Amino acid sequence: MSNRMWGGRFTTGPDAVMEEINASIGFDRKLYAQDIRGSKAHASMLAAQGIIAADDAVKIQAGLDTILSEIEAGRFEFKRSLEDIHMNVESRLAELVGPAAGRLHTARSRNDQVALDVKLWVRDTLDHLDAQVTELMQALAEKALAEAGTVMPGFTHLQSAQPVTFGHHMLAYVEMLARDRGRLRDARARLNECPLGAAALAGTSFPIDRQATAAALGFDRPTANSLDSVADRDFALEALSAASICAVHLSRFAEEIVIWTSAQFRFVRLSDKFTTGSSIMPQKRNPDAAELVRAKTGRIMGSSAALTMIMKGLPLTYSKDMQEDKEQIFDGLESLSLALAAMTGMVRDMVPDPAVLRKAAGAGYATATDLADWLVRRLGIPFREAHHVTGRIVGIAAAADLPLEKVPLAEMQAVHAGITEEVFEVLGVARSVASRTSYGGTAPKNVRQQAKAWLKRLGKEAAAPARREGPA
Ligand code: ARG
């Protein structure tokens, strides 16, 4: 059977393997809502411009609504022989409304149609991801406020460096996610031009109104070059790049959760909701969700790399290669969505152990810098010399296997005669963090202030009206 959409020149149907490699309905059915939204806007515009009759447009709209409800109710039969979502919808439309269906594709091609559908899907998904990132930021800021005074070790090289607070650590991720959200928003803003009406690649001789379809579909304006309109997938590459960077942040946090929940650390505990047991080792509580968030990052970056590779050698304009964009886009962005949801769940679920954290915060002579700073401040000695004096005192502590604050004063004075009793005030971890009041520093006072500021800002954003979209 030759194809009913372009049967004119074709006498036989495709080879079975051709159908297999060519069909995209297995995955692009996910675009059904966007495809129908775009077709409805197109049909309205065609009628408004007098390109098709008003009663044909009415039939088309009604038929498209029926198809939408059929698909949503799981009553739509997707056919691989009809290749993709566009032709599945159009073919069903012909069954439902007869010859009027054939007029929908006037002044349009599957090339601008698919560019539009994918753009709409990416845009919808960016909005969803934006809300999810916001929710995770909120969960982190709440945790930060609750744990503003909980002292924990701060690390460099995964070696105890200086004490910080758990809240401060949470707020570090809020900052990263704020930048991620900014990148998602930038991608959305740049994406928001409508390719519909570029037709196959050259535009059309019909008197279409591209401003109208762009506005109806919530775009800022139509795209300005018909060739670019059908050849461009930057918007997807940009979304996947932004998603990759966000995923890297989630992965770093996931890695920390894996470390923190281990028996050697025990910094935090996750409940049964986000862990699994072992079938053979009863003591185990595995942080699977965190591990999978870490793994999704590879997948998301893989999608980004794959689509970049698919696009890199394509001459203008559309090539069928571009059909392979979809699985990468869907998988990459949906994986990020799942990772964000899991991470938000874990942040809410996570219970830090203040005693363990405090003990760890003091281990490894983490307040050595505080001692050196004290020597500078109180005795006026240059920092380089203070560093040296401190090093010798740490040596004494290490030899005696004592924490810094337990080294007898006399032994410190033997290293530097100017040291007084007062030095002990800065050797404890709580004093150490409380003293870090410089802007952006870890002092609980700062952390409380910043956490509150974030919560206020995020709360206001949540209360603000959602992003508008014009009637489709
Ligand atoms: N299924 C195709 C895709 O996803 C739709 C566009 C087909 N265009 C064409 N000229 N064959 O890319």
Image (cartoon, grey):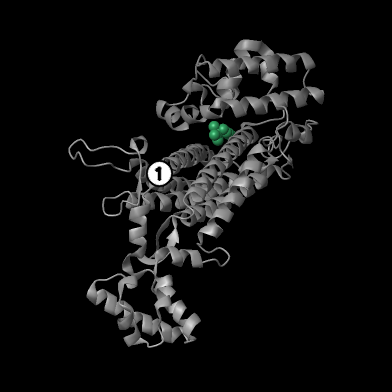
| Percent x, y of residue 470 | 73, 31
In this rendered view, identify the residue nearer to me: 316 or 153: 153
Q: Secondary structure at mark 1?
A: loop
Q: Is residue 334 visible?
A: yes
- Image-quarter location of ligand 1: top right
| Percent x, y of residue 238 | 57, 49
Q: Quadrant of the C terminus?
A: top right
Q: Is residue 330 left or right of residue 127?
A: left
**Label 1: which residue?**
350
Q: How many marks?
A: 1
- Up-down: is 244 above or below 434? above
| Percent x, y of residue 334 | 48, 37
Q: Residue at x 23, y 76 (%)?
A: 399
Q: Residue at x 51, y 54 (%)?
A: 171
Q: Residue at x 42, y 83 (%)?
A: 386
Q: Is residue 316 visible?
A: no
In this rendered view, identify the residue nearer to me: 35 or 5: 35
Beta carbon at label 1 within 8 Å of ligand 1: no
